[in-house]
Amino acid sequence: MAAHHTKDKGDLGAAKAHADLVENGFTVLFPATEHAPFDLVAYRDGEFHRVQVKYRSARTGSIQVQFRSIWADRNGTHMKPTDKAEVDVVCIYCPETDHCYYLRPADFRQSVTLRVAPSKNGQQRGIQTAELFRAFPVQ
């Protein structure tokens, strides 16, 4: 796979999330600004869901997401925690599995790690299996 610029990865993640949501019966709406705390809105059955999309590669069999945004500008690098009141669902696109995983950030603290492959030491306790997060969470 060719190297991707960070913005390209974000665009690919949003495109994969869009396709996955449409395949699952959602109408997908996009904000008219890049400054919204979410990347898209998923609409189905009279309900709107604000979705933030994250592109994450699997490292050592797992995907890790920290609930924050990081950006750089002429004043340096900045970090802002996700305001969980402004995002209903986080969609994680993983290029190694070519799947989207959905979770509610309010169900987790500062981060989550999803296992896409069994751990090498066989650990089972406390493991979040990524496949359990393939379905869009129902309210």
Image (tube, rainbow, N blue to C red):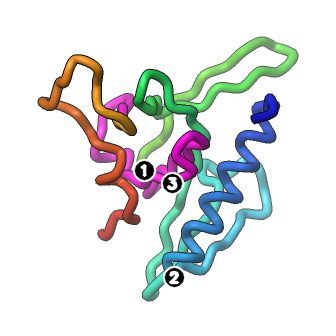
Q: Please give the name of the residue rendered at 50% of the width and 52% of the height, measured from the top-left corner.
A: 91
Please determine whether, in this image, residue 138 is positioned above or below residue 56. below
Q: In the image, which is nearer the foreground, mark 1 or mark 3?
A: 3
Disc 1 to disc 3, how far (Cα)? 22 Å
What residue does disc 2 label?
25
Name the residue nearer the viewer: 111 or 86.
Answer: 111
Q: Above or below — where is 29 with respect to 131?
A: below
The numbered disc on residue 23 is none
Tell me where residue 117 appears, x and y as whole percent.
Answer: 36, 35
Mark 1 closeness class: few <14, some 14–19, many ≥20 residues within 10 Å: few
Q: Is residue 90 above or below residue 110?
A: below
**Residue annotated with mark 1:** 85
Does the magenta segment cover residue 93?
A: yes
Query: Closest to the observer: 93 or 45?
Result: 93
* Disc 2, SS: loop
Label 3 vs 2, first from the N-terminus: 2
- Of residues 94 and 8, the one drawn nearer to the viewer in this rendering: 94
Under mark 2, the amino acid is Gly
Q: Residue at x 71, y 66 (%)?
A: 30
Ranked by sequence position, the earlier of labels 1 and 3 is 1
Q: Is residue 86 visible?
A: no
The type of residue carrying mark 1 is: Ala
Range of magenta residues: 85-114
Query: Visible in this render: residue 52?
Result: yes
Q: Which residue is mark 3?
A: 100
Distance from the alpha carbon under mark 1 to that under mark 2: 25 Å
Label 3 element class: strand
Looking at the rendering, in which quadrant would you find the N terminus? top right
